[in-house]
Amino acid sequence: MQTIVRDLRDRTHYFADRDLLDNLEWFEAGPNNDRLVTRESARNFRNALDACVSNTQAGPSSLPPRFPPPATLSAVVRLSTQQYSLTSCGNWDPESQDAPSLAFTMSRALAEDPFVPQLAGDFQAGMNNLERVCARLFGMRGDPQPAVGAVAGLNLHSQLRIYHKVFQTQDRIPAGGEESSESGTAETVEFKLEDWPLRHAEARPELEKLKGTHFVVPLPAYDQAGELIRPTRYEEQLKGAIVRLFFGVRHWTDKNNHAFTADIQSIRVLVPPPSPNAGQFTRKRVARFDDYVVEPSSARKKARQNI
């Protein structure tokens, strides 16, 4: 496990690192839309934007640079068995109060301390870092609202709520990435929207409404061997597992309430969930009589004296 963490520290921003905040900053990607990015990517964006403005003043206009992508934070966590809906459809049904329609559903789970001895203290240190990251945004904006209340959306101190948006609008498909079939390429797998599994049959008419306007976004979740987990097995293979989690952090406001979300970028199972039958007797045959014999107190006393 320590080898895995060393690799995460070398290749990503491990969320328990002491210098995490030194390498990250908030970037305003649009109205009511902030994302946590690396300082290097933000600096590169500003330099490219300055160059674009200079080129425009000197001659033909050039395309503006793309916004910096969300920073990839990493952690080793256990996916809680409580409040689990990290499934192919977020367990959405027409009576659901979480999303007004299937198009807006978010699958989610609670990430908690894995209680691995080699990682003792890392989870709480990471949660403390996230709290400071969120509080920094208020320092930039001069927001009088206390940071503790504002970061409650992350469920800090004990569990981190992580999200995955299941459906995206067609205008979000990158060039050359149109949906085709479940075959994809040798390196990728694509799924047809009409074949996407749903927990409740009542949601099927809502899925039909998304044809032509949305595409499905499979959860980038992988088993111990690195194989993509099938959508019908998300819950079976992830609920209760210890995983390597890559995620990004976003902020927005809703009715004057600040909200932060940890968006899943990828998941890799390190320790699978315990078997549902773990600890249960599964003998095909059982003893005809009870083999536990209660000895008289005098016999127990004599046995102790003979030791």
Image: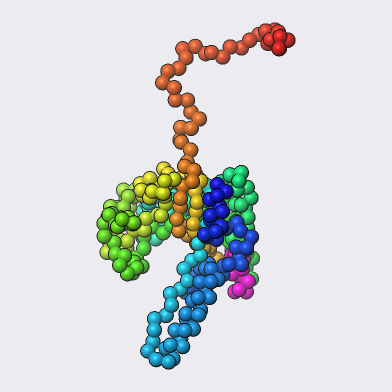
Position of 43 with respect to 61 (left or right) is right
Residue 140 painted magenta? yes
Q: Nearer the viewer, residue 277 or 95?
A: 277
Query: Looking at the picture, does residue 238 appear above or below residue 139?
Result: above
Query: Looking at the picture, does residue 241 appear above or below residue 214?
Result: above
Q: Quadrant of residue 75?
A: bottom right
Residue 172 painted magenta? no
Query: Looking at the picture, does residue 107 appear above or below residue 285?
Result: below
Q: Residue furthest bottom?
A: 58
Q: Quadrant of residue 128?
A: bottom right
Magenta residues (range): 132-143
- Rendering coords of residue 174 (x, y %): 34, 68
Count of all numbered marks drawn on residues in the image: 0
Position of 297 with respect to 244 (left or right) is right
| Residue 102 appearing in the image | no
- Rendering coords of residue 260 (x, y %): 53, 63
- Rendering coords of residue 247 (x, y %): 49, 59
